[in-house]
Amino acid sequence: MLAHEFVRNAYLAGTAIALACGVVGWFVLLRAQLFAGDALSHVAFVGAVAAAAAGVDIRIGLFALTIGLAAVMAGLGRRGGADDAVIGMVFAWILGIGVLLLAVLSTSSGGGNAAIASTTLFGGIYELSASTAELAAAIALLVALGVAAMFRPLLLSTLDPELALVRGIPVGALGAGFLILVAVVTAESTQAVGALLLLGLLAAPAGAAHKLTTSPYRGVALSAVLAVLAMWGGLALSYAVPSLPASSAIIGLAAAGYVSASAVPTALRRAASAPRA
Amino acid sequence: MIAERNDESLSGSSAGSHVDPATHQEPAVALSAATITRAGQQVLADVELTVSHGEFVAVLGPNGAGKSTLMLTILGLLPLAAGQASVLGTEPVAARPRVGYLPQRRAFDESTRVRGVDVVSLGLDGARWGLPVPISPAARARRRDVRRRVRETIELVGASEYAQRPIGELSGGEQQRLLIAQALVRDPELLILDEPLDSLDLPNQAEIAALLDRICTGRGVAVLLVAHDVNPLIGYLDRVIYLAHGRALEGPVEEVITSEKLSDLYGAPVEVLRTTQGRLVVVGTPDAPHHHGPRHGHP
């Protein structure tokens, strides 16, 4: 199947995007920022629609709007976080603009808007061109490197912001920087698995990793590996079963991984406690 | 009587525990005529405080008296409005790398799935950028050194048994021991703890107080501890500094916590009672926020 160019493109972009989602997702869960990730993914959808309405590359809309809003949320929230009221308000407001733009699009253009809406909502990883896939892979790898660079200061400011400040870590700027990385991952993954489903790729592998290991380094690595496995498996499944959309298969596998991981510790605990009791 | 009880318990702990003064010319903390303002309002005025190396000093006082604020000043996070502050013989900001700090806190969330040992480790390298990838021999040696120091510190605080478990699943006392290890792992010369006994049950309060006393005596670390109850610490303390109404009173426990001294500090009749077990009870403190007192809350 790798003989087809569109398959190679999907694997290239998909692997890097899954890797970034896994790495970022581990911290998103630890920082309890999944709601921020959810809001950003919806904003990504609106960004794509807005770009289409303006007649520019949808990636410009995706990145501009997600990064811009991550910065706004970081600025409004405390210490580079964002509180839920702010996120909820931004979330709904932006979606409202998205609905408006869709209405504008459907009256002005012929019918391409429906395709754009569907691709950004549900993903189109098998439709990526070689250059799009290469750029996506490069950006995702940069995000993963960014998280690696800020690993320990980010961990300390998540667990103990007061101490992090005393140790000279710019807690607020770091939190804002991380939220921007989440935005970049979101914009990038929207092209692959879609705005509605990318939350699963952010949350499920990371959730499984948090259940399976309590070491931060192993946790992040495991989260990335699980996300990449879900991506590869999902792409293969979708290729084998043409009626199965790739994003459904990817998210389905990621969710299955989470459910299995939830079962493992319970089973282990039972096995460990039973003989001794 | 409390004084006698103190003398007894002191014999095994902080009495004679002082580090040889010749090795430390400068006191660990020296504040003179220190005035602290926050958000334009005066919190404390004319504070005199000297903490020597290896001394165990408690910072006492009612809520909002400026205890945490005083700690922020010593950490160099809040400049003095007037007076002098010196920490470990230098400016507070410059001394900060040599100071261990345990912020006032709530417990870790139950869902925090990070091991205690990782939390302790962050005390040592939490501010370092990048990953500790052991590619060069120097990096490998550094990583071994980090692991050894983390292990030794965890042993010192008696947390080895549960340091590998997720910190969110541990009890308040267990978490507090690991956080003390986190503050200690840098080998600080001064340890500042903001209400570390808060929200612990009485046996745990006693154990943590004894642990801090061992750190003080064994390692010659000066310990400055914010507390709102002096009782778990009686017997270990070299001195207390009592804050109220914008002023501070410093001295040995039995000299400061008296009806006369506290009445004078509060400007209102306050009575200090001693129970038969030697516990101190302060009654009659005007605890409502004072009309001119801008001292509310903590950072």
Image (cartoon, rainbow, N blue to C red):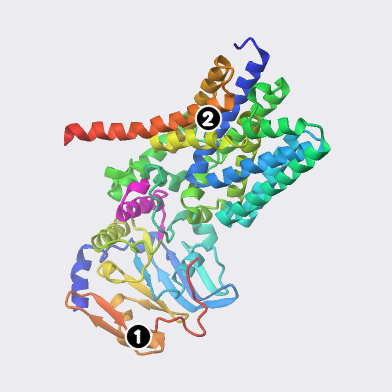
* Crowd tier of the residue under label 1, counting other residues whose Cα lies within 10 Å: few below 14, some 14–19, many 20 or above: some
Q: Is residue B26 above or below residue B4?
A: above
Q: Chain of mark 2?
A: A
Determine if marks 2 and 1 fall on one subunit.
Answer: no
Question: Which residue is denoted by mark 2 in the rendering?
Answer: A251
In this rendering, does residue B135 appear at all?
no
- Front-most of residues A127 and B291: A127
Give the residue at x 43% y 34%.
A208
Determine the image quadrant of residue A199. Answer: top right
Specify the amino acid type for callout 1: Lys
Q: Is residue A168 above or below residue A7?
A: below
| Chain part drawn in magenta | B167-192
Determine the image quadrant of residue A77. Answer: bottom right
In this rendering, does residue B54 appear at all?
yes
Determine the image quadrant of residue A232. Answer: top right
Q: Quadrant of the N terminus of chain B?
A: bottom left
Question: Would you say B241 lies left or right of B36 here?
Answer: left
Give the residue at x 20% y 72%.
B7
